[in-house]
Amino acid sequence: MFKEVLRRSAVGAVFGVTLSQLIAIVISLCIADGNFYAVVPSLTERMNSEVSAAIVQTVCSFLYGAVFGGMSMVWELDNWSILKQTIVHFSVVSVITMPIAYVTEWMPHSVIGAISYFAIFGVSYAFIWLSQYIAMKKRIDEMNKKVVEMA
């Protein structure tokens, strides 16, 4: 199981960095002034260098993806209830998400900014969780239907 956690963490890390770069490209296209914005300007100012800011964001995106990838193993713990799996997964990814969002300046450095970011994260998490739950329930229902037909 440990090897699988490491494998998923590695895949997640690559996905995290890739997603971070894609978001930077989309943001740059939306700004549409011909410049590429690898990181938010406030992070560049705080790091005193765009290269330093990009390194910090890349490392944070790597960690972010690695945690999400590794934590996907929680969903395979059949002896845990879905409630326990969800609470543990949400808690761990929340604990890593907030400091990374703060360090990379993906959220304003204020109480309102933190609350807003966490609310957006929570709603996004709930939406993704619910869509995955519905899809999995549908697949299970279809498998159960086939089992009944075969019997």
Image (spheres, grey):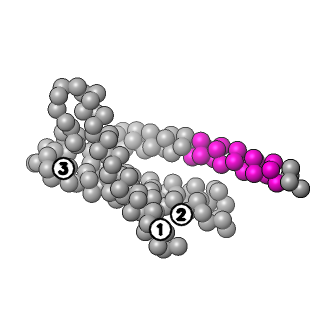
Please provide percent x and percent y for residue 35. Answer: 16, 32
What residue sits 21% from the left and 37% below the top?
37
Question: Label 1: which residue?
Answer: 5
- The answer to which of 32 and 125 lies nearer the viewer is 32
Q: Residue 1 colored magenta?
A: no
Crowdedness of circle 1 by 10 Å Cα count: few (<14), some, many (20+)? Answer: some
Q: Looking at numbered disc 2 in the image, what kind of residue is underneath it?
A: Met
What residue sits 29% from the left and 44% below the top?
21
- The stretch of residues the image draws in magenta is 129-147
Disc 2, disc 1: CB below 8 Å? yes
What residue sits 27% from the left and 57% below the top?
59
| Separation of marks 3 and 1 at Cα, in angstroms | 29 Å
Main secondary-structure element of the magenta-colored stretch: helix
Determine if residue 111 is in view: no
Vertical position of residue 77 compared to residue 102: above or below? below
Q: What element carries label 3?
A: helix
Comparing marks 2 and 3, which lies closer to the viewer? Answer: 2
Vertical position of residue 74 compared to residue 90: above or below? below
